[in-house]
Image (spheres, grey):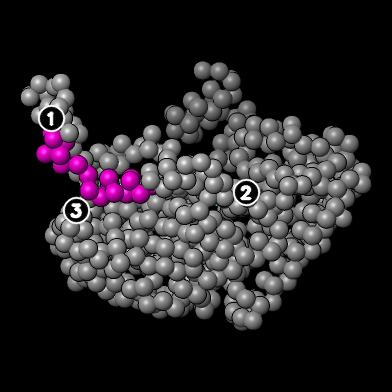
Amino acid sequence: MTHLTQSSTWQALSAHSKNVPHMRELFATDAARFNKMSLTACGLLLDYSKNRATTETLDLLFALASNSQLEAKIKAMFAGEIINTTEKRAVLHTALRSTAEQSIIAEGQDIVPEVQQTLNKMQGFVSSVTSGQWKGYTGKAITDIVSIGIGGSFLGPKIVSQALRPYWNPELTCHFVANVDGTSISEKLKLLDPETTLFIMSSKSFGTQETLTNTLTAREWFLAKGGLQSDVAKHFVAVTSNVAKATDFGIDADNIFPMWDWVGGRYSLWSAIGLPIALLIGMDNFRALLSGAHQMDEHFANAPLTENMPVIMGLLSLWYGNFFNAQSHVVLTYDHYLRGLPAYFQQLDMESNGKSVTLNGTDVDYSTGPVIWGGEGTNGQHAYHQLLHQGTALIPADFIMPLQSHNPIGEHHDQLASNCFGQTQALMQGRTFDEALAELANSAFSAAEKQLIAKHKVMPGNKPSNTLLMDKLTPSTLGALIALYEHRTFVQGAIWDINSFDQWGVELGKDLGNDVLARIGATQNCDALDASSNALINLYRQGKI
Ligand SMILES: O=P(O)(O)OC[C@H]1O[C@](O)(CO)[C@@H](O)[C@@H]1O
């Protein structure tokens, strides 16, 4: 057993988890429950009152955080200590949104000047492209951007751009290519004019298979359409730490934006990886995005644990995962612009906390990162909310909604909000057998049928949810929201004593994939592999089952 599960606080939480009253009772006995269990910070309001939590619950969870040295671990991250211990790196995505006046030391040097220089370089590039000053090989201005990247080099730019659609530059269109499936880039190239298209290749290594393959294909297309290799520099730029490979490809060294070891891929949208975002929404709005995240950084670093939004959300998620066997967590965005956010949070949380050994290599004896999933409301209500209400799994939910719409039309926003709030209420209170039976009183069912149907209509309730509100979805509130989830992820990893910042689990699949690729291309037989892999490769070679 690990220190964590042997601790008295953990044992107390385990015992306590069996004695928390139904939320119906918690609300019925405390009219001030919302006032006590809601918090505002950085333009966001968190209502965490619809949780299976009493004052005792929260006290125990905060004690668990303190006993896990959470405050010290937060300070260590912001101080640039080597907390990504297996890769011997600092974790300083927060430095990407620091102010110019700050001084943050990483690997022996102040990194703020370089961050500021890169932002200024981005500003110059954005201005050059959006003003029409940047010309393609036939002298035309750029109309289309193609962002090529995968994982954090794709999800951040794609989803933040999507979320900030009201702020887009109308003269520019941005396309996102990630999957190595030829369909992805083929469908995009059909829409493009090589004379007015600019490709942004984003890959720390300039070597991730999908990104490199897509970028090589994009260059082949460009050359086939009439461009020359000497024109590549007018239509390709890179965000990478591998300058040599980027210049070998034909990219001008002046058009290479840096990536740093102290920024993990899933935490990188705030760096030059966010170049597609800045091109679409403008540098002022991109800086507002950074500023919103910076405000959440300040809140996370300075607020007491008991008034700390990422801490409270992280602890409540851990409460369900470790003491109620919740295996997943659903994010429901009641805003169409935020429809991609659950996918973004998937990489952020699952690639960070999908781990099973502690920092010192001990196998954990407790659950760690849950499956993160979700989608936009109200669509989910017609797809998977049935399971949330009456399924056997406990799935804590986060509901996210701006109070004001960018598109106030008719009754739409009233209906959206009423669905959002109605769902959290239904999850919390459920419907008892007696309530269900009473609803059937005037139905044509027989007495026996009413008893049966009522049974099927029972909803246990006591299903926990957080509701996150903001006045309006803006670059600043979006920045704060994403930083909130970054730090929520940090809180859980810190208490679980795991490394949230490496991703060794993705290596084996890549290596075996490359081995299969070689076998597909060669004539050698594959008998050395397992029977399934042998068969699958041979079927692929045949091209038919
Ligand atoms: O930017 P790169 O180096 O191409 O990496 C892309 C993605 O691949 C991973 O390294 C592994 O999935 C992610 O962490 C990262 O966001």
Tell me which amino acid carries mark 3.
Arg
Q: Which mark is residue 441?
A: 1
Where's residue 301, x and y in %?
46, 76
Q: Is residue 435 left or right of residue 222?
A: left
Q: Is 441 or 1 nearer to us in this picture?
A: 441
Inter-mark Cα distance, 3 to 1:
24 Å
Q: Residue furthest front?
A: 410
Q: Is residue 400 left or right of residue 103?
A: left
Kindly state the secondary structure of the residue where label 3 is placed.
helix
Q: Which mark is residue 165?
A: 2
The structure residue drawn at horizontal position 77% and vertical position 36%, both measured from the top left corner, is: 192
- Please give the residue where the numbered disc 3 appears in the rendered image: 24
Kindly state the secondary structure of the residue where label 1 is placed.
loop
Q: Is mark 3 within 8 Å of ligand 1?
A: no
The structure residue drawn at horizontal position 53% and vertical position 50%, both measured from the top left corner, is: 405
Q: Is residue 205 magenta?
A: no
Q: Is 37 or 394 nearer to us in this picture?
A: 37
* Residue 321, quarter of the rendered image: bottom left
Q: Which residues are magenta?
A: 420-438
